[in-house]
Amino acid sequence: MASRFNPRAKFERPFVTPEGIDLKLVIATGGQRTGAFLIDAVIQIVTLLLFSALVGALLAAFGFQKVEYAGVVWLLGFFLLRNGYFIAFELSERAATPGKRMTGIRVVARDGGRLTGDAVIARNLLREIEIFLPLSFLGYQAAEDSSSAAATLVGLGWALLFAFFPLFNRDRLRAGDMIAGTWVVEARRNKLGRNLVAEAEQNQNRFDFTEEQLDAYGVFELQTLENVLRRNDPQAMATVAQTIQHKIGWQGYAHDYDFLTAYYAALRGRLERNLLFGKRRADKYDS
């Protein structure tokens, strides 16, 4: 019945953080993922053209005597671009490429934990097998003028199989997502009725957190706390407040929202100060 009145309900998935908070994420649509990929592809093509022009200019400067070396450099640059682009952006705090950010989606770990480098690298390197391997094969066949109808069908079938793979599973997973244990979900940015940062800074003055209490959490927990505050769910805020208070050994009584916004501001300030000195704590497990 829920899906009848709310079509998005069937795409909601429980996303339970290590603190036991269910953020209920929504799986990204096929249109969002396709749009994101096309935007990223355009950015990569433009970058590749500029890189090719640079390699060509350097080759001309050497009198076209280093064609083999230029070819190796170009192939290496192309490989790093098509893989490093996705990996670098998805390892950032937003876990999203420019295309994903423009279409309002991001990558998360299905187990509710922090998105790891291993998962990001695995999901993106598998794209080589899903897309670039068959396309490279077809390109090589065309360049050698040795393509056949059978080879073309095999290459196109391979690429289309993986391209449409997300349509045949309920979580819209790529093969890379299945291997890496990731989801691509909507990155909801609900506007707050109250200004979160301003209220957090005001409430911070009412609480005195020690350095040890602020060192209990990292960037991942800060992002989770921000998501909880944006949802403004009293039950979720109560659970998170109790968890943090127990973790840091805080004694006293305060309204859950006031306590959480104060801790949010203090933790955010602490992490930003540490970042200025080259210290970045990914999460509470990062010592």
Image (spheres, grey):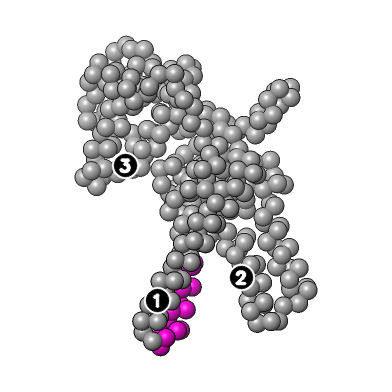
Q: Where is residue 142 in the image (x, y as percent from the top left)?
A: 67, 77
Q: Where is residue 36 in the image (x, y as percent from the top left)?
A: 56, 48
Taking the image as drawn, is residue 245 in sight?
no
162 relative to 15, above or below? below
Q: Which of marks 1 and 3 is in front?
A: 1
Q: Is residue 8 left or right of residue 235?
A: right
Q: Name the residue under label 2.
A: 136
86 relative to 113, above or below? below
Q: Name the residue under label 3.
A: 281
Question: Which mark is first along the chain, 2 or 3?
Answer: 2
| Magenta highlight: main SS | helix
Q: Which one is in front, 43 or 14?
A: 43
Q: Where is residue 38 in the image (x, y as percent from the top left)?
A: 58, 53
Q: Which one is in front, 266 or 181?
A: 266
In this rendering, the count of numbered labels is: 3
- For the C terminus, which image quadrant? top left
Magenta stretch encompasses residue 65: yes
Question: The residue tagged with tag 1: helix, strand or loop?
Answer: helix
Q: Which one is in front, 41 or 111?
A: 41
- Structural crowding at the residue carrying mark 2, measured as other residues with C-alpha within 10 Å and reported as few (<14), some (14–19) or many (≥20): few
Magenta stretch encompasses residue 110: no
- For the N terminus, which image quadrant? top right
Q: Which one is in front, 248 or 117?
A: 117
Residues shaded magenta: 64-79
Q: Mark 1 and mark 3: span between their CA atoms? A: 42 Å
Q: Which residue lies furthest to the right in this view?
A: 149
Question: The residue tagged with tag 3: helix, strand or loop?
Answer: loop
**Which amino acid type corresponds to the residue marked 2 in the rendered image?**
Ser
